[in-house]
Every structure is written in C-alpha cells, then in structure tokens.
Image (spheres, grey):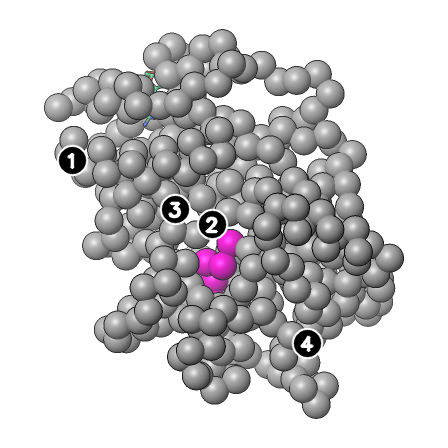
Amino acid sequence: MVEFDLIARIRARACLRDDVFLGIGDDAALLQVPPSRALVVTMDTLNAGVHFPVEASAADIGWKALAVNLSDLAAMGAEPAWCTLSLSVPNADADWLDGFLDGFLALAQAHGVALVGGDTTRGPLSIAVTAHGLVEPARALRRDGARAGDDIWVTGTLGDAAAALEHWQRGVPCIAALRTRLDRPTPQVKAGQALAGLAHAAIDLSDGLAADLAHLCRVSKLAAEISLPLLPTSSELNALQAAPHTRWCWQVSGGDDYELCFTAPPTCRDALQARLENTGTPITHIGRMIESAVHEVHLLTESVARWHPPRAGFVHFQGQDSS
Ligand code: ADP
Ligand code: MG
C-alpha cells in the first residue's frame, strides 16, 4: 500500500452530493454554493495523545475528527455540506484506515456531508479536517452578538466527557455511556440550525463552559452569571454521586462536551423551547448576560456565593516556555 492506494480506498467509500461538480481525484474540488447563502469554513486538528488517547480505536478517532468540526458549524447555525481530510499516518495500514472511515463516514452520512478532498502523508498520527457549511449571513450565530439581559442556555447535559476522561486518567473504569460522550461526541447540528436567526450569540463547548463562555463575554463586551445548581446533568453522571464541587469541575472546567451555549432575550423563551423541541434537543436556562467593566464569567452557588474552579479549562501550550 502506498499513498495512492490509501486515497483510492477513501475515494471508493466517500459519499457524494448533487452540489459537488468534482470531488476526490483532481487537484481541487469544485462545489456549488447557493447564491443567497454564505460559505462557512472551519478546521480542527486531532493529535494522538493530545486530543485522543493513543490506544483509541480508529473508528472513534474518525468519528471525533469530523464531530468536532461539525460542532463548530453548528455553533455558527450552519447546515453542513462538505469536508476535506488531511491524514498523517505512521504507515499505510489498510485495516486502520477502514476502521477510521467507518467512524468518519458514519457521521458524514448522518449529516449528508460529502468528503470532497484532502491530503495523505506519512508522519506521526494526526488528523486535520475542514468542514464547509452554508448559512444565510444575517442568520449566522456569532460570539459577539450577546446583549445585557439575555438568558444563557446550553443544549444537552454537561460534564460526562470530563468525568470519563478523569476516570481513564486515574485508571478507574467508568460507565460506558460516559465514555461514549468522550469518544463519540454528538455535534448539535440540528439545534444550531434551529437557533439561527433567533439566538443573539452562540459558541460550542469544547474546552469547558467557563473557558468557552469567557470567549463569548470578551467579544460581546459583557459578563455572564451562571447558576451552578442549574447546570444540566445526565442521569449517568448523577449516578456517580460525586460531591457538587467535583461535579461542577467536570461541568465547567472539563472539555469535550460539544454542546452549544447560546444567549437569547427572555422574550424568546417560548419560541426557543418550541423550535428546539422540534429537533429533539433539550435545552436548559443556566444564567444571564450582565453589564460589567470586566468581561468574565461569574459562577454562583446556591447561596449566590462566587465559586472559583481549581482549573479554568483546557488551553494548549499552557505552562510551556513561550520563548
Ligand atoms: P495533489 O498532489 O495535486 O495535491 P494528491 O495526490 O495529494 O493531489 O491527492 C489526489 C486527490 O486525492 C485530490 O483530489 C485530493 O483532494 C484527494 N485526497 C488525497 N488525500 C485525501 C484524503 N485523506 N481524503 C480525501 N481525499 C484525499
Ligand atoms: Mg495537484
């Protein structure tokens, strides 16, 4: 097997769409963008040992590589359309590639996304994916649109993936459902599209609620107040019966939730609930945006005391010499 055998294997299984004039096989892809919509482009890289454990299954790696990108499109309110895949692999292992494609293409197919090109090289295991989506520009969900008085909401539940990661790091077994949230995150694509044109601002939660919401606060020039007791918790996470502070750490500082956090005016509550119900995505009201000179996230306990998590969230290069 050489580079071209691997590409042929990928091409044979890639799904197609009518708006792909030319997919895998030429120097570049030719795609039809509808006239009234903007092209939404995002890219995320997964490195072995950083974004997934080295022993992760090929199928889980494939799934997650696309999922994290579709999550970014969801956070923009976009409809996913196409993707490209840059694959750096230590050797041309057909079995590994087939497993990888099982995960990657299962998710692609579920969202009608066509794999239209990429690059295949030899090197340490690393996967970079670009995802392309479509949205009417005026309806796109941005980070900088939040307004004072907006409600803050999240989709789904928080903390499952972080709890699974901590168990794995400590060598302790954990409930399969929690581990699945870490290995096979579900991008909230339908929810993102339902929120387009309704929510004021949105961000997807990859590095932890506190860290990600802080980005939204900075660019919207506001602060956020989050009520910790309101954070949505899965029954599996509840079943661990962890102390509240331990659970909050997973829910606000843990990463890999891939839920959406968004803001919307209180007048939209009924409309939001109705639209999201249609997509089958539960949403939870967890706080509000407030005016403040300091654009930060306030985490409040039951007694409305401010709680400071021991760890803010995941940041690459943290603790490394910057020289
Ligand atoms: P070039 O040398 O012109 O960049 P390549 O030989 O790298 O072309 O790729 C040939 C074709 O295969 C291109 O259409 C490219 O997009 C596609 N391709 C290469 N690697 C991948 C991959 N990992 N996934 C999907 N398509 C790929
Ligand atoms: Mg070329």
Q: Which label is found at residue 186? A: 2
Q: Is 231 above or below relative to 218? A: below
Q: Mark 4 points at which residue?
A: 227
Determine whether, in the image, residue 253 is placed left or right of residue 109. Answer: right
Q: Give the range drawn in magenta.
A: 254-258
Determine the CA span between mark 4 and mark 1: 47 Å
Residue 7 is at least partly visible in this image: no
- The answer to whether the residue labelled 2 contacts the one labelled 4, judged by CB atoms less than 8 Å apart, is no
Sequence order check, earlier mark of 2 and 4:
2
- The answer to whether the residue labelled 1 contacts the one labelled 2, judged by CB atoms less than 8 Å apart, is no
Sequence order check, earlier mark of 3 and 4:
3
**Type of the residue with mark 3:** Lys
The image quarter in which residue 161 lies: bottom left
Q: Which callout, 2 or 4, points to the residue nearer the camera?
A: 2
**Type of the residue with mark 1:** Asp
* Mark 1 CB near ligand 1 (8 Å cut): no
Q: Mark 3 points at which residue?
A: 64
Instruction: Classify the position of the C terminus by image quarter.
Output: bottom left
